Image (tube, rainbow, N blue to C red):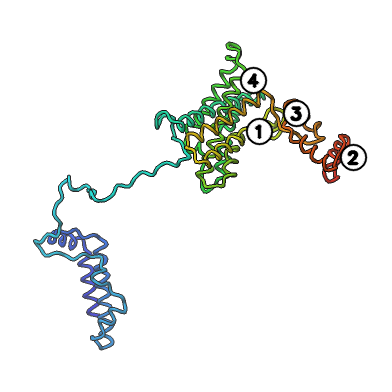
Amino acid sequence: MRSRMLASAAARLIASPATATAMTRSTGTVIARGHVQGIVSDIASIAEARAFASRAGDQSRLPAIARHIQLPSPASSPVASIPKRGVSTAGPKRSPASSKPTMNAAEPVPATPAPHPDSMPRFPWTDGVTVPGLLRGADWFGTAVFAMTGTLAAATRGMDILGSTIVGTITAVGGGTVRDLLLGRGRRAFWMEEIEYLWICVGTGVATFLAWPHLERACGVKDTDEWVDWADAIGVGAFCVIGAMNGIRAGVPCAAAVACGMFTATFGGVIRDVLMSRPVRILHSYTDIYATTALTGATTYMLVRAAGAPVSARILAGAGTAIALRKLAWSNDLRLPTYAGAEDAARARGDDGKGTRFPARKWADAVFEAMGFEVTEEEVKKVTKKGLFGRGKAD
């Protein structure tokens, strides 16, 4: 009982503000409130152990009892050792110049990682006049062109300025967005990181919606002019190469990188056509080939890369092939063949049956006729109407 009374009195004495102030003045060290509480806890634990040992009649057991109740050791105590009066524990004062951390001359400075070979600068002017920088400029140009054509397509369908601008923006960046989603691994859409693409799309869409009618009347420009086709071809060439580059940097196989190039160049138009409730252009042959040119450009880029050519040669080969093939497509009305006997269904989707068709169907017919599988045109139409498995309507 006497020990507990002494411990209580000592605890009250140490915990009082006056005692803490006096200790601070005498030692020159500020004692935090938490340190004072720690001292009180230590004294109470020691008093409890001493009282228990006294009741048991064995003072020699005090050290063991103290270990049993886990008294804090001096090394783990939160209270720092109190220096003797007049003795300063402060280290040597540092001048303002020496307060800053100094780097050892022997320590190597971490080098900036080199950019990936299949990449380009964020801005066209970053590295001067280079082929990757020109590719970035063509990317910006193609983004503006796609936004313009998408806005015009929506506006002529009766959409308001907001709807037309949204469709134009989706046409421009929708393909790259689909590509980034498919590549995965926490990738965000590229235009969320490089916000300049969003401003290019919105600015071009609004300007096209407001200014195009006046340009048509004053200058006679039309969206069917050949310069629009050339501008669109530059965008397709740039987009298919950039899509293949993104696939390479993501570590996907060669065929998947080629698909990324096609997605980047064409899937914005796919979403546009779906929103406008019209046949998807790259899935029907009511006009000249489009996705085929993007696939060819991306494939060319991958082949030239496999041959060990430098990145500038890869870019020029891939983009140049896509642009040249687009020129051939709109000049000669190149189209892909449709299914045998489905001409009426294709015509309902806008396919007039004209154009220069790739002769794959004729070659296949010739091969099967040589093997004895000759089928008349009437029989082909009959099978087409019934369906492949006989579940369609008969004549």
Label number found at residue 224: 4
**Residue at the spot of label 3:** 351
Which part of the image, by quadrant, shows the C terminus? top right
**Residue at the spot of label 2:** 394
Residue furthest top as drawn: 218
- Mark 1 or 3 closer to N-term? 1
The kind of residue on which mark 1 rests is Leu
- Mark 2 or 4 closer to N-term? 4
Q: Residue at x 48, y 40 (%)?
A: 118
Residue 389 % position (x, y): 83, 46
Real-space CA distance between mark 4 and mark 3, rounded to the nearest whole angstrom: 18 Å
Residue 39 % position (x, y): 24, 68
Local packing at callout 2 (Cα closer than 10 Å; few below 14, some 14-19, many 20+) is: few
**Residue at the spot of label 1:** 275
Q: State yes or no: discs 4 and 3 in contact (Cβ < 8 Å).
A: no
Q: State yes or no: discs 2 and 4 in contact (Cβ < 8 Å).
A: no
> Image height check: is 136 above or below 66?
above
Q: Closer to the camera, 188 or 142?
A: 142
Q: Secondary structure at mark 2?
A: loop
Q: Closer to the camera, 293 or 309?
A: 309
- Mark 1 or 4 closer to N-term? 4
Q: Residue at x 80, y 36 (%)?
A: 340
Real-space CA distance between mark 2 and mark 4, rounded to the nearest whole angstrom: 42 Å
Residue furthest front as drawn: 370
Q: Residue at x 58, y 11 (%)?
A: 218
Q: Secondary structure at mark 3?
A: loop
Which part of the image, by quadrant, shows the N terminus? bottom left
The kind of residue on which mark 4 rests is Thr
- Mark 4 or 3 closer to N-term? 4
> Image height check: is 285 above or below 181?
above
